[in-house]
Image (tube, helix red, strand yellow):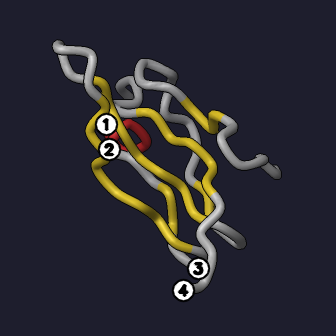
Amino acid sequence: MTFGTGETIFRKGDPGLSMMIVTMGCVRISTITSEAKEIILNLIQAGEVVVEIALLDGKERSADATARFCGIT
């Protein structure tokens, strides 16, 4: 699967049925607080795996995943 920058990969509450390997760019894992503020929990880089507890425990995803462009600085 390919996702463009800013595109949602999965949302909190979705079923956790898969894991993914990031081949380009990065994936921002985040959640929204009760005060409607976004908290970034992790930034997964190319070569790393996107897997969540939901895949292991059979429950819903616990955060959102968004495709991001991560340039070299």
- Which comes before the other along the chain, label 4 or label 2? 2
Residue 53: give x, y in percent of width and height.
32, 44
Secondary structure type for disc 1: helix
Residue 11: give x, y in percent of width and height.
50, 26
Q: Do callouts 2 and 1 mark residues in contact (Cβ within 8 Å)?
A: yes
Amino acid at dot 1: Asp
Amino acid at dot 2: Ile
Residue 73: give x, y in percent of width and height.
54, 86
Q: Residue at x 63, y 49 (%)?
A: 67
In the shown orientation, is residue 4 left or right of residue 26?
Answer: right
In the shown orientation, is residue 12 left or right of residue 1?
Answer: left
Residue 62: give x, y in percent of width and height.
33, 31
In the shown orientation, is residue 23 left or right of residue 46?
Answer: right
The residue that mark 4 highlights is 73
- Which comes before the other along the chain, label 4 or label 1? 1
Q: Residue at x 27, y 16 (%)?
A: 36
Q: Badge 4, how many Cα within 10 Å: few under 14, some, many 20+?
A: few
The residue that mark 3 highlights is 47
The residue that mark 1 highlights is 57
Q: Residue at x 45, y 54 (%)?
A: 51
Quarter where residue 58 is shown:
top left
Residue 53 tag number? 2
Q: Do callouts 3 and 4 mark residues in contact (Cβ within 8 Å)?
A: no
Q: Nearer the viewer, mark 3 or mark 2?
A: 3
Q: Nearer the viewer, mark 3 or mark 1?
A: 3
Q: Nearer the viewer, mark 4 or mark 1?
A: 4
Quarter where residue 68 is shown:
bottom right
Q: CA distance from mark 3 to mark 1?
A: 24 Å
- Which comes before the other along the chain, label 3 or label 4? 3
Q: Do callouts 3 and 2 mark residues in contact (Cβ within 8 Å)?
A: no
